[in-house]
Image (cartoon, helix red, strand yellow):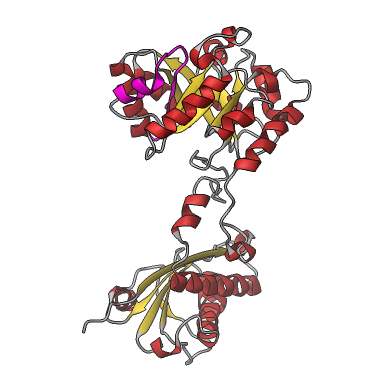
Amino acid sequence: MVMKQVFEIGEALLGSGAEVAHIDLMIGDKSGPVGIAFANALSQLSMGHTPLLAVIRPNLPPKPFTAIIPKVTVKTGEDISKIFGPAQASVAKSIADAVEEGIIPSDKLDEWVIVVSVFISPQAKDMRKIYHYNYGATKLALKRALTRYPDLQKILYDKDRARHPIMGFKVPRLWRPPYLQIALDNPSIKMAKRVIQEMAKSDRIILEAGTPLIKRYGVSIINELRQVDGAKDVFFIADLKTLDVGKVEVDMAYEETADGVVASALANKESLDKFIYEAKRVGIYAIVDMMNVPDPISKLKSMKELPDVVILHKAIDTEAGEGSGMDKITSRAEMVAMIKQEFPKERMLIAVAGGIRPDSAPEALRSGADIIIVGRYITQSRDIERSTREFVRLLAEKAPKAPGDIDLFRVHEE
């Protein structure tokens, strides 16, 4: 009987400042891929990245035997001291402790080997911090490797919320509804910036550069608004209401860092198909606005590929009147349910726009709307923060709960 070989991978970042520790490791059987990597590391040396065995003290390595690979080029005697001192000792001690604590099975000590990549910054000075952070990071990476962290639920939840510490900003995605989309329709850049500065802060807020604003300032307004405090991490939509040359207008929005772009469903099938194809090709959201379309479901069925978001929209100029069909909030709520029923397996979000207020939003959310789009109730409010908060509270009641993660109490950066 052939036993399946162990090959597990772990990663951890701990600490702060120049002494921050980042560990990547592989652990597995000597006779498997990790064993081959271990042998290659010790036999195929690279200048400035010379591997070394982890040792608790000279002549005392822990088991499983561990090869340490410096990530940063070792150039000076000071660099050598950091690697062959606190880095080497911390990795070795963490492995020995992991065996004692049962993280590494004691019956695998002579069957497994470990390869650890260690980051030591040339600017690191504090030897104790180097030891302290690398010990913790190695232990955490081992635990994660042998528990196969993270699970899929954790990845899918965090991928749209996480902020890479070096990149410095988040790139949100919209697959955890519901959301509030604030339509910056007033063609005044001063007013748009004021709304962003004063709105309540929430990761459930989307900002829309409205059509009048874009007509006055161009699509580049998105890049400018991103510089406002509070907008760096927000999902930005360019409401171009594209009717023709779909590919060209998607590329315009993409070049100005829009996360999503809007076409009008009144466009012909060929333009919409090219619009959706290009948006998905470059990795931004294709959004189709159904304003003045009498049968949204038939329109969606006519498309070669469905958009990421469909908007059920009552025009501003008809909000004061009764209108007909989808021009009523109740009719739109019914249409939300009908679209959900017609396309039950599609990852397509449904937004409701036009005349949405705190008293009408709950009905849209109950019907299954993923996004409520609000303009003047927030942008023309005397208290923008309070008006935004009214909707954020409604969203919180419908929002999915975060998966538990014990490691959040142990790591400084994730």
- The C terminus is located in which quarter? bottom right
Please, which residue is most extreme toward the left here? 1
Q: Residue 348 at what x, y percent from top left? A: 42, 34
Q: Residue 99 at what x, y percent from top left? A: 50, 85
Q: Is residue 401 above or below residue 123?
A: above
> Is residue 284 visible to the viewer in this orientation of the structure?
no
Q: Is residue 364 above or below residue 68?
A: above
Q: Is residue 412 above or below residue 268?
A: below
Please, which residue is most extreme toward the bottom here? 59
Residue 199 placement: quadrant = top right
Residue 287 part of the magenta segment: yes
Q: Residue at x 56, y 37 (%)?
A: 178
Q: Is residue 354 above or below residue 137?
A: above
- The N terminus is located in which quarter? bottom left
Q: Residue at x 56, y 16 (%)?
A: 328
Q: Residue 132 at what x, y percent from top left? A: 62, 73
Residue 377 placement: quadrant = top right
192 relative position to 331: left or right: right
Q: Residue 376 at what x, y percent from top left? A: 67, 17
Residue 3 part of the magenta segment: no
378 relative position to 247: left or right: right
Depth check: 287 or 339 in front?
Answer: 339
Extent of the magenta region: 283-302
Please, which residue is most extreme toward the right here? 382
